[in-house]
Image (cartoon, rainbow, N blue to C red):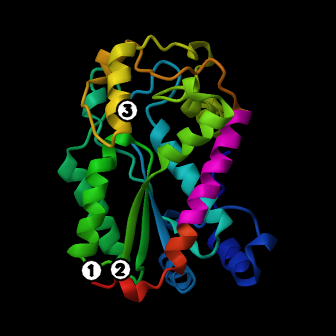
Amino acid sequence: MPMVSRTDAERESANGRGASHGAPGPVLLADLTSPAFARMRERAELVLIPVGAHEQHGPALPVSTDTLAAQVLCGLTATLLEPRVVVAPAIPWGVSWHHQGFPGTISLREETLMAIVEDTVRSLHGFGFERFLVVNTHGGNNAVLHLAVERCHRDLGIPVVASVYAYALLAAASDDVLGPDATGHGGGDESSVVLAMRPDLVDRSALGQRHAHEPLRRVQTIVRAAGGVLPIEQHRITTTGVTGDSSEATAEAGQAILGRAANQLRAIAEELIDVDIEQFRP
């Protein structure tokens, strides 16, 4: 289920007469020319900023898993709300120090990710955008992104800027579709989503390899359920980098998970679009 981008002419045509009559797909800011960006800005009301990570996801999934999920989830949501919602280029790195015990991980310092988010919002705000939603699919980014959106509002004067942990939407959908045992890093939830998006990137022979240290995983889950955090390097929790059961992962399950999560994200986006912006001005 890859995102489908369009030429400027196709976007202009579809947006001018109703998206249902044009080619399907979201408006991706990275695909627009500068003049097309200026014209699009007259219609768009909310910018989605996908934030992922570049980190190990076990032997079956690519290191780009989180970024792919963020991009596609934003693309599906923007398509549902076109032309009111557009998608900024994804931020493909995150705070992933806890995965550096496995090869392939690239981790940003917290202040680096914060600066990238703030500079992205600052730049787009300079062209007139006033509503932003950061769509994050990596738990290690949460603390930084909470502070980043606060600073964008407080210090930059952005009226409406929010951050959501979109992986939670995917995980909740997966609990319904595959059951709770599938949910977890590199598990059935993420494996199904990647099978739906980019099956060519999945090593199917490695699905189902978990080998988690259950006592450590359990205590970390308990702390997280209470709204807290218990930092543990991933290689201490699992020898494969995986904590969820991916043995039952399918592309069909991934499509169902993405569809449910996109509908939830759509509802959040609509609320941010419709809220009275004057009440948010610093």
Q: CA distance from mark 2 to mark 1?
A: 6 Å
Q: Which of the marked residues, 2 or 3, is nearer the chain's N terminus? A: 3
Q: CA distance from mark 2 to mark 3?
A: 33 Å
**What residue is pinned by disc 1?**
157
**Residue 38 left/right relative to 157:** right
In the rendered image of this protein, does residue 277 appear above or below residue 75?
below
Question: Can I make out residue 6 in this image?
Answer: no
In the rendered image of this protein, does residue 84 appear above or below residue 78?
below
Q: Quadrant of the N terminus?
A: top right
The picture places residue 118, in percent across and down from the top left corner, at 27, 65
Residue beneath the point at 53% across and 29% down: 183
Give, as a three-letter code, the residue at label 2.
Pro
How would you rate the neighbour count of disc 3 (Cα within 10 Å): few for under 14, some for 14-19, many for 20 or more? many
Q: Nearer the viewer, residue 108 or 222?
A: 222
**What residue is pinned by disc 3?**
55
The numbered mark at residue 159 is: 2
How would you rate the neighbour count of disc 2 (Cα within 10 Å): few for under 14, some for 14-19, many for 20 or more? many
Residue 258 within the magenta-colored segment of the rendering: yes
Front disc: 2 or 3: 2
Q: Which region is colored magenta?
A: 252-268
* Residue 11, quarter of picture: bottom right
Give, as a three-letter code, the residue at label 3.
Glu
**Secondary structure state at the residue bearing disc 1:** loop
In the rendered image of this protein, does residue 84 appear above or below residue 93?
below
Give, as a three-letter code, the residue at label 1.
Gly
